[in-house]
Amino acid sequence: MKLLITGGAGFIGSNFVKHILKKYPHYKVLVLDKLTYAGNLDNLKEFLNSENSFLEKDYKTEYPHQTIEDLDSLSSIFSSQLEVNPLFFIQGDVCDSRLMEKVFPRVDVVLNFAAQSHVDRSIIEAGSFVSTDVYGVYVLLEAARKNPIKRFIQIGTDEAYGSIEEGSFKETDPLRPNSPYAASKAAADLLVRSYYVTHKIPAIITRSSNNFGPYQYPEKLIPLFITNALEDRHLPLYGDGMNVRDWLYVVDNCRAIDLVLHKGKVGEIYNIGADNERANIEVTRLILRLLNKPASLIKLVKDRLAHDRRYALDSSKIKSLGWQASYGFTQAMEGTIRWYQTNKNWWQKIKKKDKEFQEYYSKQYQERESI
């Protein structure tokens, strides 16, 4: 089977690539990623060589690969490369319809991880979220309509449902997103559903709770707080720290998506949550305890706009297919911390050398008033 994995150099996408190639060594994977700030070829470096990737430019001078000059020959090139390599990488944009037209005829399955995914950034600038998360999905669906595929898996989020005070969201509940990011993902889900109904695209949607684990860009709460604590820097906690999330170890999410890919029912939606509800302050204290760092590193900062109070998912549907989370929250956190401890070069390259990250961090946290 040949899989197109868009956003495959990002956090969840790259973890899924590793999972698939380890579990199904006979599968072939075409990864497409725009390599924006959160896309990182270091996440896939064990699979890359000078022949099996096309880049728009030398990627940070560390990956001097070929550049895309002739789209007409691209599909035949990556097809021949997949005969000798398990993975082929293309730096490209899901909004590029011409590129998608060259790619789709050569694959059997599409899994769309590509998305602008950070709520805070969507509050600052929502345009790129609408472009990638909505228009990009439209381009993919149009390519799927013109080139029949076996499965189209849209990777969604629980944030599309909005906040819930009590109980848990079911797949049949209405979507009430409260941030531009959540709205863009909700719109994408509705568009996917419409193409399933109208054009019979064999689509399935997953909506997972908050993921964490290795290779997560250090702007999100858990990797930011782990790396800040390792550097003895303040952990900037929004508001009163009592916002609740259901945390899901990324490896468990990859297992669930794998199950949906192979056994999920076309046209259905599957929630993926691990029943690990924790307040942000509780998560923060656990990180400090596991790292033997003082609570004085916690610094309450001004809350973000439209900060959803609680997310919770009813995951009985995916569990009926045989899925269960394999990792307890503390166990998964310990593994995540070990990864960031032993891969300092990975995140220090971002935090200390990436001016874009530094400017964002300063604007988002250092300029906020303490409360």
Image: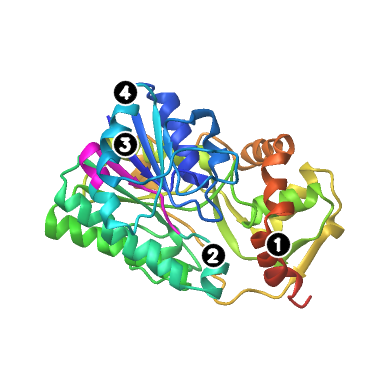
- Residue 302 position, x and y percent, is 70, 75
Point out the tag, 1 or 4, that comes first from the N-terminus: 4
Residue furthest front as drawn:
69
What residue sits right under mark 2 in the picture? 310
Q: Earlier in the sequence, mark 2 or mark 4?
A: 4
| Residue for badge 1 | 358
Q: Nearer the viewer, mark 2 or mark 3?
A: 3
Q: Amino acid at mark 4?
A: Glu
> Which amino acid, by three-letter code, is at mark 2?
Arg
The mark closer to the camera, 1 or 4, is: 4
Q: Which mark is residue 83?
A: 4
Is 310 on the left or on the right of 150, as rendered? right
| Disc 3 + disc 1, Cβ < 8 Å | no
Per the image, the residue denoted by label 3 is 3
Residue 129 sits in which quadrant? Answer: bottom left
CA distance for labels 3 and 4? 14 Å
Q: Label 2 vs label 3: CA separation?
A: 35 Å
Disc 3 residue crowd, few under 14, some 14–19, many 20+, Cα 10 Å: many
Q: Horizontal placement of 170 versus 233: left or right? A: left
First along the sequence among labels 2 and 3: 3
Q: Residue at x 39, y 26 (%)?
A: 86
Task: Give the foreground label among 3 and 1.
Answer: 1
